[in-house]
Image (cartoon, helix red, strand yellow):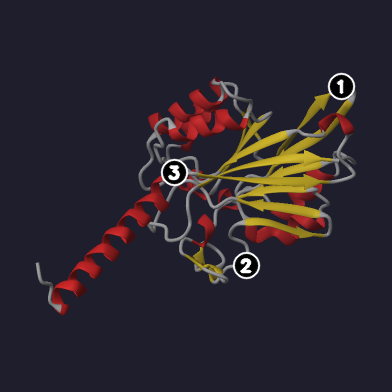
Amino acid sequence: MNFTKKHKYLIITLTITIILIFWMLWGNYSIQTTHFTVQDEELPESFNGYKIAQVSDLHNKDWGSQLIEKLQEEEPDIIVLTGDLIDSSKTDLPTALEFIDQSKEIAPLYFVTGNHEAWSEEYVQLKAELVEREITILDNQSIFISKGSSQIMLAGLQDPAFQNSSPEETLKTLSSRFEGFKILLSHRPELYETYAAQDFQLVFSGHAHGGQFRIPFIGGLIAPDQGIFPEYTAGIYTENQTHMIVSRGLGNSIIPVRINNRPELITVTLKN
């Protein structure tokens, strides 16, 4: 069979299009597990090797068994949920609660709110369901996790969209409760300098969705409350002995698609 130049260009274009479609589908419907190790001399010896899984920005995304199976593979000591479990424009409590029911069988869950919880009229019901399931909600609260005779503090900041208190004053109060290793759960990465100023050794955050469209060698294109070419979108940042982990998240909201920005489950291993 003889192919003209026109036919060859058509075949090449069709092939590239098919490859791009599969790449886009893979990049939006497959979860990447990212591992970090955080080392800090403040960490008690008994917590050496302690594993924390982070789930952020699900936005009611139903991952079927994929997310649960990946969490099971990680065998975390605890799972932290850093906001936007639901989406204010498409709130689906049964989907959110199915994930909660399955994941709490893997490890204890600790939850803080995001802006979509603040915006959703159904958050009151979601909160009641979480309390009924004995899920720890750390909105402007802290708890101590013990191993042997040692403790670390786990605190959470309620999303500022609730407008109930000043983040600065709340963080100052939370931090003052403990002199040892402190972990903070807070949805908003753009408040990083505020977290670092209050001597939290480790912060888990989300909200930025990885910058939605990630440009090679540059990073994310756009993020809520940070605008174009945002500073904090994904990975680990360190300032004043404070490490902040920013999850790319697992769902979408206003912008329904990601480019070069796979949904992400994070596992952090603590070392002293």
Could you say which is closer to the camera, residue 64 or residue 188?
Answer: 64
At x 81%, y 40%, the residue is 271
Q: Where is residue 35 in the image (x, y as percent from the top left)?
A: 65, 45
Q: In this view, does 61 lie above or below 165?
A: above
Q: Residue 231 carries which label?
A: 2
Whether residue 256 is visible, yes or no, is no
**Residue linked to disc 3:** 120
| Amino acid at the residue labelled 2 | Glu
Disc 2 is placed on an element classified as loop
Q: Which image quarter holds the C terminus?
A: top right
Q: Where is residue 218 in the image (x, y as percent from the top left)?
A: 57, 71
Distance CA(mark 1)–CA(mark 3): 41 Å
- State the mark number for residue 148: 1
On screen, residue 180 versus residue 111, left or right, reads right
If you read the primary sequence from the N terminus, does the residue marked by circle 1 or circle 2 appear first?
Answer: 1
User: How packed is label 1: few (under 14 Cα within 10 Å), some, or many (20 or more)?
Assistant: few
Q: Do the residues labelled 1 and 3 touch (CB within 8 Å)?
A: no
Q: In the picture provided, is 131 more to the left or to the right than 252? A: right
